[in-house]
Image (cartoon, grey):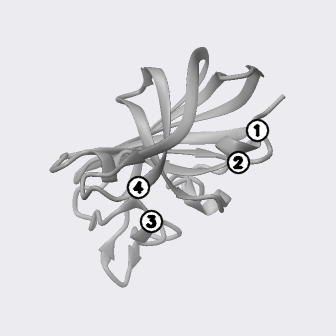
Amino acid sequence: MRDDGLVGRWSSASLELGAMEAGTIGFRPDGTGWYELANVHSSSVDRFGWSTPGPGRLRLRVLRSLELDWSGAPAPAPRTRPDPAGPHGPLGPRPQLSSDERLDSAWESSYRVGTGLDVAGAAVTVLVFDRPFGFDARFALVSRDVTPGDDPTERLAPRG
């Protein structure tokens, strides 16, 4: 069972003033997703399967952990990063996959989706876990549309 209200791309960036890194979590309608913790030099991505075993409960099964090295590559916001399809792009070198580890670990938490304020005081839809996943426990909705290309490691390490 899955709560379709979680489907989308969520980020901690707009909730943390001056943060040097930010987390993004994506939930796809097919029950797969990812969490990225990114800073200027690197990012780590955990890919997972997800379900909601009961109202307000989220279960993630982490299947793969990947590390990207952005040194020498521009590191703008995750949505505007250069396409990692090749070694060089219009903005310079692209990230390199520095680690790819298969996992099988479980994480479970209660969650709620509601209204909150971002750092500028604007109303946003927030997703709050009762304990952090990775580094973050609060995310603001960025978009309900989520595609495989939103996972920053998709082209470097296809699913499968």
- The residues tagged by marks 3 and 4 sit, at their Cα atoms, a distance apart of 21 Å
Q: Residue beneath label 3, please?
A: 79
Which of the 4 quarters of the picture holds residue 36? Answer: top left
Which quadrant of the rendered structure holds the N terminus? top right
Q: Specify whether 49 is left or right of 102.
A: right
Mark 2 / mark 3, whichever is N-terminal: 2
Residue name at image x 35 percent, y 49 percent: 117
Image disc number at residue 31: 1
Q: Amino acid at mark 1?
A: Gly
The residue to which callout 2 is attached is: 28
Packing grade of label 4 (10 A; few <14, some 14-19, many >=20) is few
Q: Residues within 10 Å of mark 1 (few under 14, many from 20)?
A: some
Residue 123, numbered label: 4
Q: Residue at left 60%, top 15%? A: 108
Residue located farthest toward the right when viewing the structure as drawn: 1
Q: Amino acid at mark 2?
A: Arg
Q: Residue at x 79, y 33 (%)?
A: 2
| 27 versus 81 height, above or below | above
**Separation of disc 4 and disc 2 at Cα?**
24 Å
- Tell me the crowding category of disc 2: few under 14, some 14 to 19, or many 20 or more residues within 10 angstroms, Cα based: many
The image quadrant of residue 96 is bottom left
Q: Is residue 119 visible?
A: yes
Q: Earlier in the sequence, mark 1 or mark 4?
A: 1
In the rendered structure, are the residues bearing label 1 and label 2 in contact, judged by CB atoms less than 8 Å apart? yes
* Left or right for 93, reference 127: left
